[in-house]
Structures are given as structure tokens and as C-alpha cells.
Image (spheres, grey):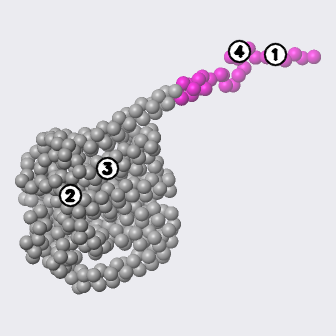
Amino acid sequence: MATRTLPQPGQGLEHPPSDAPERRHAAIPAAASAGRQAASAGTLALVGLVAAMALLAITTAAAASKAVAEASPHFFPGWLAGPLHGLGLRASTVELELLVVVICACYLVALGCASAISSRRLWGAIVLAHLAALLAPPLLSGDVFGYIGFARLDVLHGLSPYSHTAATAPNDAIYQLLGWTNLTTPYGPLFTLLSDALVPFGIAGGVWAFKAIAALTSLATVVLIWRAAPRIGRSQRSAIAFYGLNPVVLVFAVGGAHNEALLGMLVAAGALCILAGAELRGGVSLVAAAAIKASAALALPFALLGARRRGRVAAAMALTAVAVTVIAVIAFGPHLFGLAGALLKQQKEVAGHSVPAEISQLLGLGQLALSVRIVLLALFGCVLVVTLWRTWRGAHWLDSYGWATLALLAATVWLVPWYGLWALLPASLSPSRRLRIATLIACAYLVTMRLAIQNPLSAA
């Protein structure tokens, strides 16, 4: 009877014992440690961002400065300073700029660690940062006075803001606070109707009503992003951190009481509805956004091509556009059609830090060379056609919309920091990491140009 010989250890085995399980077990504590470190760094960044936002709110409320509504140093009533005025903590203009830099740095760290930070901490930081932006006086822009001025023309003086400028009512109390007195309103009819409704609150009440609207609609946008992110495979925490903690949103859009925050909420609501298959509501929301500000109209063709049921979206958009037009004509009459002229006139104004203006100056062609503007407009047209074609071929519509928006920002000659919010919304929900990086670069450009190069605070 034959006997069976067992192989000796290490002999006759096709696959010798491996130390892979030991390496895997060793990697688990290392990964857990890295996660804890990221969570700690992210939490510290959140604390730093909220603290810097609070300091920015307190110090700008202490005394008049170029950071507050671009107001005169001799005009700083208590109603403009806001509820934090009594704290009396002052800062120099350079220190105010440094606070914005700190906010930007903390944002980048928190964004990089967002996936390791608990949802509760992220939400807490977003809410507190928005609260600080709300309580600050109007920051780095006097546009909120323009909103009120156009509304007062309509309600108090019976003059359509689509055909009359503020110069036609120079005795109005708002006149001395306006930065633009020779322009008709460039805003859509729904926003003008909203502004008209706030006139009974007076100038002070109107300012803080617009600040509250900006803060609340921005937070609502974050909620919508949170709900929409899983539908496209995005991390909810990364998506809300990308938008809700961004300095363009906090310091400029909410801090300055800009209607971009309202615009963002309506576009986000439309995006969520399109993603969820509620095409009718999505079409209504996106057309409403365009009736707040014309720039939102860029989202319409991308949403239409990206929807599963394009016919429903097209019908909703068409019916809503008709309804808005009827309401607007009833409210403003034929003067409404002056909106197109106002938008064209605005594009004749040149912001020194717009991309066409910067390129023109770098090439020694003056403030704005027509050839440079034509080239950039042509590039925008090409990007628009290509992104629409890619969307029709199956590319994600939010990704395509984001790239087209960045191209629009590069081509426009009137560019201000809060316009960066146009690109932030699609980028926060886009599956494209390259688009998010490009959007962050655009935001960094806008903030840098505003604070350090063109019209810096320290030059005041």
C-alpha cells in the first residue's frame, strides 16, 4: 500500500503563504489615522473660516470704510452699520483684506478635507458663516442701493425703471447713495416686482431685507445641492462645501446682498427637478431664474437637451415664458422692452479686471481693444456650440453648462466678483473634477483682482 508524503513547509506549494493579509490589516489603522487627521484639519479650517467671517462682519460694522457698500467715509449711519455696530472692533483696510485672504485659505483646506468632516460640522459652519455675512453691513458693493433706487422710481415716482434713470429723480433720498445714476435697470421683471414690494420698508428696511433674502436663498441653494448631489454620484459633503463655504458666495454675494443668491437658488431648484424627472417644475424654475437676471438664460438650452423628457421641459419653459411676459407687460407696459437696451448699454461699460480688458492692456492696446473683444466673443460662441453638441450627444448637461458659463465670464467686458456664482452652481454639481478646478481658478482670479489689483481696498 502506497503511502502519501506530505509536502514539507515551503515545498510543493504553487502559491507560498503571502503577507498580504498582514499588509491589509496594517493599512487599515493608517487609513483611519489619515482620516482623523483630515477631519481635524478640516474642522480647524471651518473654525478659522467662521471666525474670520465673524471678524470681517464686526470690523466692517465698526466704522466707515471702502469695504462697506463703497460708501463715503463721511456717511455711515447706524442703520447701514447694522446690529454689530456697537461692538466697536476696528481694523485697517489691509487687515480687512487679510481677513478675506484667511477666509479663502480656510475654504481651500476645508474643501480638501470635506469628505472626512462630519455633516453636522459642515452644516454648522455653513449656517454660521452665512449668519456672519448676513449681519455684516453691505460689503464691497453698493448695488443694493441700485435695487432700491430702481424700485423707488417705479413705486414712488411713477417712472418705469426700464425707461428712466435715477437722474430723473435727483431729490429722492436714495440718490446720493447710488453709484450708477445714468442707467436703466438691467434686471428682469420678476426681480423688479420683488424690489417694488420692498419699497414700503424704506431704504434701511430695504437694505436689510435684501441681505436677508440673499442669506436665506443661499442657504436654500445649499439644501438643494445636498439633495441633488447623490443623483449624479457627487459626495454631498464635498458638493455643499464647494458652494456653501466659497468666499464668492459668503463675502460677495451674501455679504453684498446681491440677487445672484436668489438666482442660484432658482437654478439649483431647476437642476434638482430636471435630475429627479420633474421636468415641468424644472422648466418653470429655470425660466423664473432668467426673469430675475438674463444671465440665467444660458442654463435653458443645456437643461432642455439634458432632460430625459425634452418635450415636457420645452412646454414648461414656453408656457412660463409666456406667463412671465404677460405679467411683466401688465406691470410695466411697453417700457419693459427697454431691458434689452439696458443690457447692451451695460456691455459698453468696461470693468478694468475683465479678461478682455486685462488682455488688451497686457498687449498695449489700451483699455479695451475691439479685436480682443471679438476674439473672446468668438471663442465663447465656439465653446457654446461645442458644449451644446456634447450635451446632445450625451454629456452631462451640468458639466457642459459649467464650461459655457466660464467661457461667458471670460468674454464679458463687465465682470464683478459675485458673477463667479454663475459658475459655482453647475460646478458644485458637475461630475467633472476639471470643471471644479477651473471654476476655483476663476473665483481666485475674481477675488484677487478685486482686492489686490483693480480697485483694491488698501488704495482707499
Q: Point out the frontmost of discs 4 and 2.
A: 2
**Numbered badge on residue 416:** 2
* Magenta extent: 1-28
Q: Which residue is mark 3?
A: 131
Q: Point out the frontmost of discs 4 and 1.
A: 4
| Of pointers 4 and 2, the one earlier in the residue sequence | 4
Q: Which residue is mark 1?
A: 5
Q: Is residue 442 visible?
A: no
| Helix, strand or loop for disc 2 | loop
Q: Which residue is mark 4?
A: 9
Q: Amino acid at mark 4?
A: Pro
| Of pointers 1 and 3, the one earlier in the residue sequence | 1
- Whether the residues at callouts 1 and 2 have beta carbons within 8 Å, the answer is no
- Whether the residues at callouts 4 and 2 have beta carbons within 8 Å, the answer is no
Residue 285 in which image quadrant: bottom left
Q: Amino acid at mark 1?
A: Thr
Q: CA distance from mark 4 to mark 2?
A: 74 Å
**In the image, is residue 3 above or below residue 293?**
above
**In the image, is residue 440 above or below residue 302?**
above
Q: CA distance from mark 4 to mark 1?
A: 12 Å
